[in-house]
Amino acid sequence: MFTKGTGTAVVTPFTENNEIDYGSFGSFLNFQIESGVDALIVLGTTGEAPSVSSEERENIISFAVELSNGRVPIVIGTGSNSTDHTIETSQQAMSLGADGVLVVTPYYNKPTQEGLYQHYSQIAKNVDGPIIIYNVPGRTGGNILPATVLRCAEFENITGIKEASGDMKQIDTLIRQIKKIRPDFSVFSGNDDQAFHLVCSGGDGVISVLSNAMPSETVEMINTTLEGDLQKARELHLRMLPMMKNLFAETNPIPVKYAVSRLGYCRNSLRLPLVQATGNAERLVDEAMKESGTKV
């Protein structure tokens, strides 16, 4: 299972007719694996999971698992705002050979901290495999607090969290507390621009949008930070900062889909309600790719 390092939250390529482009998807996943990433996170927000049908979901999972063939763990985004539906999609992912699931906190219905605990405890009791919590208040409207994460960590198959709250004080508090009771509990940054800082604070890596376009560089930054070579890691972090910023010039994954298309690994096609990047966003990504040294 993915416990440390760099996991790429991969884009999902589409054809001109807006179908899944498995040829491009296979080439892109191989590019990621050959670039040294430690895991592939499939069907997350960056993979446009809300726009993928149930049949497509099953096919995408099977395809990614078969292509990886054990080279890196395949983690599937399965979260929804229904506990029962999340359990069903998580069980499906594990039955298809996934190595774990990434479960976002429920969105829109905004449960209390007790509701969040009950949500994850029911998933843990009913899913036979590793579960990573995903905290992203900017998208869900809710924030899972460190105290609730500590309660969830009582379940051994809840193995980590992707932290995208943006609140480094909260993240530092979580790392300080969780590592005392579960040293094996992984804390991943969900924000590329905070990944260097999170690992310096004792975290374990990143689940990254940036690594779609700069996988080997992201891997190097995270690994050198974990190894304690902070000068080199800092240099990489600062060099890639323009990309970290401009990949969010518009709603993710709009800019990163454009960046990956510039690299030749997919068409710049998205499914509604997402649309292609504006000219201004494209310009910002182009400038960032040049400034950060992305190999186009």
Image (cartoon, grey):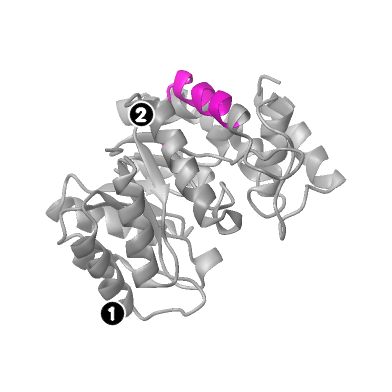
Classify residue 144 as left or right of residue 55. left
Q: Is residue 50 above or below residue 73?
A: below
Type of amino acid under label 1: Glu
Residue drawn at (57%, 37%), measured in percent from left and top?
210
Among the two numbered marks 2 and 1 on one chain, the one whose residue lies closer to the N terminus: 2
Which SS class for mark 2? loop
Our reading of the magenta stretch's main secondary structure is helix
Residue 109: x and y, percent? 47, 80
Residue drawn at (62%, 41%), measured in percent from left and top?
20
Classify residue 185 as left or right of residue 57. left
Residue 7 falls in image quadrant? top left
- Observer able to see residue 216: no
Q: Nearer the viewer, mark 2 or mark 1?
A: 2
How packed mark 1 is, by other alpha carbons closer than 10 Å (few <14, some 14-19, many 20 or more), is few
Residue 13: x and y, percent? 63, 38
Classify residue 186 as left or right of residue 164. left
The magenta span reads 25-40
Q: Which residue is mark 1?
A: 114
Residue 241 falls in image quadrant? top right
Quarter of the image with the C terminus in it: top right
Type of amino acid under label 2: Val
Q: Is residue 268 above or below residue 112?
A: above
Q: Is residue 260 above or below residue 254?
A: above
Q: Which residue is mark 2?
A: 72
| CA gap, disc 2 and disc 1 | 34 Å
Relative depth, front residue between 45 and 285: 45
Relative depth, front residue between 225 and 12: 12
How packed mark 2 is, by other alpha carbons closer than 10 Å (few <14, some 14-19, many 20 or more), is many
Residue 203: x and y, percent? 32, 44
